[in-house]
């Protein structure tokens, strides 16, 4: 069973601060995805990274895939209250039998 | 209208009762999934189906069964509900896309088993 460890589990910060969330595994993944989930809703995909060392930016969010494709990070610059939510990383080993393995999530609260 | 809908959104039931959670999608996707979410445990896969004739167990299928009635419909049943099945249940859909495959989630069903 492939496990994805996310840290921290909880994060409470003030508006304007920067933060980084980590997603680590001992397994190699063909791709890693980051989802955001808001209360009362299902997770929504933010980004997919597939190449070791890849960096993707989505406005104030920067996603990085580790060189060995075992870990990933999400960095938010100048966090805003609208960034509040549960951030989930999910990995797949690819192939025809596609399934996602999810981390336990990081619950982020950005206070105004 | 939402692409992936789940009914009911909330359900309270008693131990031993049989209940069914339903999922419908208008995205035209072949692949459908059922997950449960528990605080501190993330999303765990219960069952998945890659087409109408295909049903596969996920990591926590004990106590659950599914039916893929059509491409657009995938239902989850709890034959005899127990309190530790209290959780938030999500349906998701996707189309084959290799490593870029995206899953689209419904809004969830909150289930309480007393």
Image (cartoon, rainbow, N blue to C red):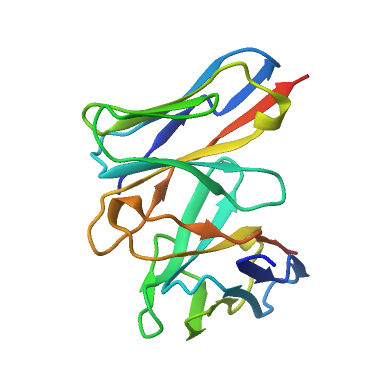
Q: Is residue B9 above or below residue B53?
A: above
Q: Position of residue A59 (x, y in %)?
A: 54, 28
- The residue lying at 58 percent from left, 77 percent from top is B77
Q: Is residue B71 above or below residue A59?
A: below
Question: Which quadrant: the C terminus of chain B?
Answer: bottom right
Number of numbered discs overlaid on the protein picture: 0
Question: Which quadrant: the N terminus of chain B?
Answer: bottom right
Q: Nearer the viewer, residue B97 or B86?
A: B97
Q: Is residue B61 visible?
A: no
- The residue lying at 70 percent from left, 23 percent from top is A110
**Residue A25 as seen in the image, left or right of residue A8:** left
**Residue A53 as seen in the image, left or right of residue A4:** left
- The residue lying at 41 percent from left, 83 percent from top is B52
**Residue A29 as seen in the image, left or right of residue A18:** left
Instruction: Specify the quadrant of the image occupied by residue B54.
Output: bottom left
Q: Is residue B9 visible?
A: yes
Q: Is residue B15 above or below residue A36?
A: below
Q: Position of residue B64 (x, y in %)?
A: 51, 73
Q: Nearer the viewer, residue B77 or B81?
A: B77
Q: Position of residue B107 (x, y in %)?
A: 66, 59
Q: Position of residue A33 (x, y in %)?
A: 41, 42
**Residue A13 as seen in the image, left or right of residue B47:** right
Q: Residue furthest front?
A: A59
- The residue lying at 57 percent from left, 74 percent from top is B26
Q: Is residue A80 above or below residue B2?
A: above
Q: Nearer the viewer, residue B77 or A69?
A: A69
């Amino acid at each position: 069973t492939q496990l994805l460890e996310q840290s921290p589990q909880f994060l409470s910060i003030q508006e304007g601060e920067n933060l980084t969330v980590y997603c680590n595994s001992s397994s190699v993944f063909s791709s890693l995805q980051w989802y955001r989930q808001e209360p009362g809703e299902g997770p929504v995909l933010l980004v997919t990274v597939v190449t070791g060392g890849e960096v993707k930016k989505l406005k104030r969010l920067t996603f990085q895939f580790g060189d060995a494709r075992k870990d990933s990070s999400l960095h938010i610059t100048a966090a805003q209250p609208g960034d509040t939510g549960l951030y989930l990383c999910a990995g797949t080993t690819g192939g025809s039998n596609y399934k996602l393995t999810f981390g336990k999530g990081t619950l982020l609260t950005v206070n105004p | 209208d939402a692409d992936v809908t789940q009914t009911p959104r909330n359900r309270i039931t008693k131990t031993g009762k049989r209940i069914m959670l339903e999922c419908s999608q208008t995205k035209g996707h072949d692949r459908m999934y059922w997950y449960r979410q528990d605080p501190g445990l993330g999303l765990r896969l219960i069952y998945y189906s890659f087409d109408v004739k295909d049903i596969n167990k996920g990591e926590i299928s004990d106590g659950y069964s599914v039916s893929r009635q059509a491409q657009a419909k995938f239902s989850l049943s709890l034959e005899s509900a127990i309190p530790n099945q209290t959780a938030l249940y999500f349906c998701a859909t996707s189309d084959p896309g290799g490593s870029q495959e995206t899953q689209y989630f419904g809004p969830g069903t909150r289930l309480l088993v007393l």
